[in-house]
Image (cartoon, rainbow, N blue to C red):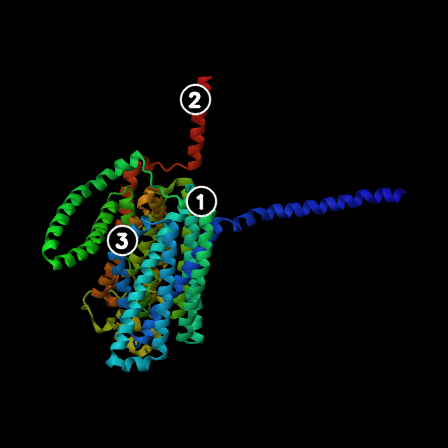
Amino acid sequence: MDLEIEEEPSVSTSIHDSSNEKGGCMKRLDPTWRFLQSAHFFIYLTHLLSSWGDRMWHFAVSLFLVELYENSLLLPAVFGLAVSSSLILFGALVGNWVDNNTRMKVVQVALVIQNLSVILCALVLMLLFVYKIQITILWNGWMKIICYTLVIVIGVIADLASTAMSIAIQRDWIIVIAGDSDKLSNMNATLRQIDLLSKLLSPMAVGQIMTFSSSVVGCGFIAGWNLFSMCFEYLLLRKIYKMTPSLAKRGDKRTKEEEVSEGNETAFKDHDNIAAAVSAKGELINNSTNHNHKETGCIKGILVPGIRTFRDGWIIYYRQQMFLAALGLSFLYMTVLGFDGITMGYAYAQGISSSVLSIMVALSALTGLIGTMFFTMLRKYCGLIHTGCFSSIVQITFLMLCIASVFAPGSPLDLSVPLYSSASDQLEAHTTGVYPTDVANASIIKQSNLNSQLPSNLTNSTDIKEYISIALYFAGAVSARIGLWSFDLTVTQLIQEMVYESKRGIVNGVQSSMNSIMDVLRFVLVIIMPAPEHFGILIILSIIFVSTGGLLFFCFARKTLGKDLFKCVCLKEKDLESNKESTVVAESML
């Protein structure tokens, strides 16, 4: 009996302990499980699918066009120019469309148009690869030109739809989902980290498929991925929309402060409306007398609203409080210090191998991730605007290494070389590309031919001093991305927080147009000075533009903070000081 009495509590104790362990395990897993079922996780997953597909497509389409056009970069250059030009012309219109429609309708239409356009482009490219000979002969080669034009036009439509999707999700939805500034900062940083990882890994995935199979299989894989991504993203976005009821509400009720601030923006429309009414009466009189004037009126009815929206969008953008900060971000796009085809072409001309270039691209992605973490930590202690100031200083400081590379041993700088010299043919072939891996096809060119075109100081690879210049260039460009992405996140959040909800689309659309203008200017300068001997000038111009962007942000910070700009006090210290002040006031009242 004694033994039985002693065993019963031991058994109950063990059961109780095991239940406590299970309960503790469930409590530890409970936050993770809640996160996996939250709107935050679903928006991250949606962005991963979208970003992965976009990066694969942008990487592959240039290689497809290069292969189809006999290893020439003419078609990728035309494609890139067409995309940039379309954003300049239609960025404000796309943003205005996002503002004037419900959130769910915008993402539904943009998602379907974007993915179906990419699928259609991939199918057309697949037909070009399979029936290249037959299409070339058909209609004396005009059929091939029609197919190329179709790919470019549909690609432009896909990019405009992608812009609308980006504005809707990254500039509107996450503001509503986050709810406060701290969560918004973390979400912005996480989305940028996903984007950087996709930029690094997705080209590797599709590149392996194209290398070990064929371009036809690559086209089929991209078409299949976009079909899967479109369906899955739609389900995720619909679930997010249902989980967040505030997404169904547009901020149509305007506050007095907003009406006052927009009074100046809308005042100029009154005169236009009166003039439009007068012109409309005149058109009615003319239409009653001549049928041709009806057709003219129809054309005006289509073009005039679009032109007016384009003009109004730029005026609204100019009158935003964060205009100088947004303009400063746009200036950063006029640079040859990014890891794109221009950088890769210059490195190839300096004798750098593909393996080293791939390592540099990986390091640039790593420093970009560090920049996102730098942003989140610095913002907690110094505030958003001070974070932008420090990020700009960090970026410009590291870019001084690029300035040093222009005059360091091994630099090809030679202003006596005329433009479009024979030594620049190899670089010029690469500078028209848009993505780093566009230059992979350059390996088919014999090294002896390249050496015969380059200056003598670049053909001798035995002297270590000849690599000092390119080493400084990469050291500065890689390190500066810490400040670059932190600055980018800062301005992005300023636009999110300082632009009224009813104007988020059109302001971000014009911002995309401004970025494209600087991007086109970069290509124009490279076309004017394509020789490696002139690349040092492009480096100096790039740093001037980056410094100007930083200066514009400092002007915005000075205008916003005033004398507090130079008082970067830790936020925690500010909270302690405010608490002390409140306790002192309370004690005095007592």
Task: Assess disc 3: are there few (<14), some (14-19) or many (≥20) residues with their C-alpha within 10 Å of its C-alpha.
Answer: many
How far, Cα to Cα, is label 3 from label 1?
27 Å
- Above or below residue 23? Residue 476 is below
Query: Which residue occupies the foreground of this view, 437 or 52?
Result: 52
Q: Secondary structure at mark 1?
A: helix
What kind of residue is marked 1? Pro
Residue at label 2?
585
Direction from residue 44 to residue 265 in the image, left or right: left
User: In terms of image quadrants, where is residue 476?
Assistant: bottom left
Q: Image point 46% across, 24% down: which residue? A: 583
Mark 2 and mark 3 lie on one chain; the one further toward the N terminus is: 3
Q: Nearer the viewer, mark 1 or mark 2?
A: 1
Mark 3 and mark 1 lie on one chain; the one further toward the N terminus is: 3
Image position, residue 418 (x, y; %): 18, 68
Q: Image point 44% across, 72% down: which residue? A: 209
Q: Secondary structure at mark 3?
A: helix
User: In terms of image quadrants, where is residue 515?
Assistant: bottom left
Q: Nearer the viewer, mark 2 or mark 3?
A: 3
Direction from residue 7 to residue 324 in the image, left or right: left
Task: Assess disc 1: are there few (<14), some (14-19) or many (≥20) residues with their C-alpha within 10 Å of its C-alpha.
Answer: few
Q: Is residue 461 visible?
A: no
Residue at label 1?
245
Query: Which residue occupies the foreground of this view, 41 or 398?
Result: 41
Direction from residue 13 to residue 489 in the image, left or right: left
Image position, residue 366 (x, y; %): 43, 57
Image position, residue 277 (x, y; %): 15, 46
Residue at label 3?
93
Query: Which residue occupies the foreground of this view, 373 or 320?
Result: 320
